[in-house]
Amino acid sequence: MHDQTPTSEIARLREHIDAMDARLAELLEQRALVAARVQRLKPVGYFAGRDMDRERRLVERMAEHAPRLGADRLAAIMDSVITAGLAAAEEEAARGR
């Protein structure tokens, strides 16, 4: 017999997802901050200095840890993460931060 109803199990799992999403957001923020520092140090930074070969290698390494998602899905996710981080860094640079 089940200890929980499907509704309570869904609620419990959603709470777990919410906690993971909060941790993921914190990691994304940290990543964006470090990436912004890198962009300021590169001779050609921001979108003009984007290294697609490095991004491909990054996705391949990540796919080893997330086989369910696979390289193609991770490539789309990381493209969004990198694009958002570069845009934020570029905006901060324009504001003189």
Image (cartoon, rainbow, N blue to C red):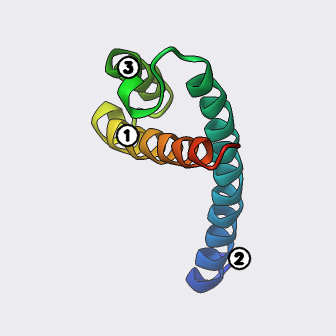
Asked if residue 74 lies left or right of residue 29, the reply is left
Task: List the residue tagged with mark 1.
Answer: 79
Q: Nearer the viewer, mark 3 or mark 1?
A: 3
- The picture quadrant where one finds residue 6 is bottom right
Bin the neighbour count of mark 1 within 10 Å (Cα to Cα): few under 14, some 14-19, many 20 and up. some
**SS label for mark 3:** loop
Which is more N-terminal, label 2 or label 1?
A: 2
Q: What's the CA distance linking mark 3 and mark 1?
A: 12 Å
- Which of these two is toward me, 24 or 50? 50
Bin the neighbour count of mark 3 within 10 Å (Cα to Cα): few under 14, some 14-19, many 20 and up. few
Task: List the residue tagged with mark 3.
Answer: 51
Q: What's the CA distance linking mark 1 and mark 2?
A: 42 Å
Q: Are marks 2 and 3 in contact (CB under 8 Å)?
A: no
Circle 2: residue type = Asp
**SS label for mark 2:** loop
Which is more N-terminal, label 3 or label 2?
A: 2
Task: List the residue tagged with mark 2.
Answer: 3
Circle 3: residue type = Asp
Circle 1: residue type = Asp
Residue at point 70%, 40% (across, down) = 30
Q: Is residue 29 above or below residue 20?
A: above
